[in-house]
Amino acid sequence: MNHWTLEKQRDALRRREISPAELLHAHQERIAAADPHLRAFVRVFENPTGAEGPLAGIPVTVKDSFDIEGVPTLTGSLYRLGHKAARNATAVARLRAAGAVILGKTNCPEFLANYETDNAITGWTANPWNRERTAGGSSGGEAAAIASGCSAGGIGSDGGGSIRVPAHCCGIVGLKPTPGRVSAAGHFPEIAHPGGLLGVAGPMARTARDVRILFDVLAGYDPRDPFSAPVPLRDDPPQRLRIGLLEEPADPAITAAVHAAAKTLTGLGHTIEPFAPRGRERAIAVWDFFFNVLTDELKRQVIATAPEKAHWTGLELLREPPAKPSGLEVVTQLAVRDKMRVAMLEQMADVPVLLGPPCAIPAWRKQERPGPFVETMAAATPWNLYGFPALVLPFGFTPDGLPVGIQLIGRPYEEETLLAVACHLEQARGPFPAAPIPPYA
């Protein structure tokens, strides 16, 4: 039952075909067997309990960047070892209020500053499909836990692909919502201005239908999140839409998956047409300014307090210090970002969904880091800069058996449209194979 979808687990519990205790025990056994080989978990809770609600009895996990009251939020860093959260992150509180059973917290790179999940506390998280390959980052522990059947679903965060790239690497589904649609209050590093223009909290699971179930629980206004807006949930049945096809450089297996998805969508009655985003050539540099240039100085200040605590990822990703950005430069870059966002909204006025690759490569070997990562992840980062929702759905394999995903992008606050298209596409694709469950002897 570990690889049952979240929806199937929920329905089996409601029909009393299994008990919450049986479902919990099955997941605890799976964690005990698999996690020593995957290192997906930072902490496993011994006696987790749930409550009544739409997710009653469902075992879920939480990325270790979200606060759980009384528990450290380490975010992969030795600098955080003395931390203890005073209250639950809003996303955690909503999962618990819905009755979900939180099994544990999942691994991430130090300060979430890498597309590979590795740190000096828990170590490197392996991909369940091939333990020589990465699970991606920064929500790599969450993706590995879900793909391996240790968890039915959970919550990650994404400032430049950190939900979508691990989902792609591990063959699961991940949604990056519009900023504020799912509260990021209680996340560390804090998702506030200006970085909160990029970073969001979002659900991850094995199917798009499961992600929709989690989204319905997690979405909603929260005064603790400065980006939150009172946007009601909507039913959005599949419609025949104009969908823009993004032809971007990617591994042949990823390109093949994108074209297969386009063909499937055409068969479902959607109109697929080429889409060439205008102004994208500046998007990566502007995203890099907000995600890296503004935060590098803060990282240096932290590292200077105790250099011996800095893991290799924290050091290696720091570039030579440029001149500190001035206030005028920050305001100018914000204005550039706003103009780019308006231009993209205008271009998508009659094209509500885009289809393209999630990134340029499949799951790579441990610490291989092929190519400049900013360029390698260029299919993911602009949508953080614009604040548009985006979703990754598994849709194929490399010749050596690694899963690859496709990315769907929507307009702000139109997550329901994106999820409807993903569910429609998922149904036509058919069940995606589960990650193999080796004995881990």
Image (cartoon, rainbow, N blue to C red):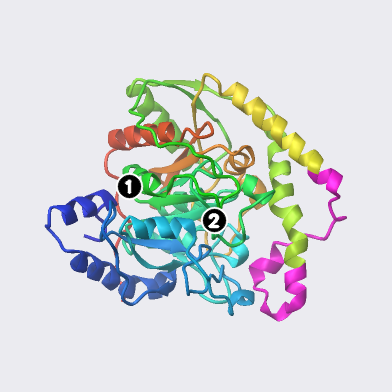
Instruction: Tell me the kind of residue under disc 1.
Output: Asp
Instruction: Tell me the kind of residue under disc 2.
Output: Ala
Whether label 1 touches label 2, CB < 8 Å: no
Residue 293 at x, y = what percent? 76, 53
Report which quarter residue 280 is drawn in. Answer: top right
Question: Is residue 147 visible from the viewing direction of this image?
Answer: no
**Count of marks, rendered view:** 2
Report which quarter residue 378 is drawn in. Answer: top right
Magenta range: 301-330
Q: Quadrant of the N terminus?
A: bottom left
Q: Residue at x 51, y 22 (%)?
A: 351
* Mark 2 residue crowding within 10 angstroms, few (<14) / some (14–19) / many (20+): many
Would residue 320 appear left or right of 215 to someone viewing this image? Answer: right
Question: Is residue 405 visible from the viewing direction of this image?
Answer: yes
Residue 303 higher or lower than 275, as above or below: below
* Secondary structure of residue under mark 1: helix
Does residue 296 show up magenta in the picture? Answer: no
Residue 88 at x, y = what percent? 47, 64
Report which quarter residue 23 is drawn in. Answer: bottom left
4 or 412, which lies in front? Answer: 412
Which of the labelled discs sits on residue 39, or is there none? Answer: none
Distance of label 1 from label 2 (alpha carbons): 23 Å
Q: Residue at x 61, y 77 (%)?
A: 78
Residue 350 higher or lower than 44, as above or below: above
Would residue 428 appear left or right of 211 to someone viewing this image? Answer: left
Q: Which residue is mark 2?
A: 185
Does residue 316 show up magenta in the picture? Answer: yes
Which of the labelled discs sits on residue 210, or is there none? Answer: 1
* Secondary structure of residue under mark 2: loop
Residue 382 at x, y = what percent? 62, 39
Q: Quadrant of the C terminus?
A: bottom left
Q: Residue at x 43, y 62 (%)?
A: 62
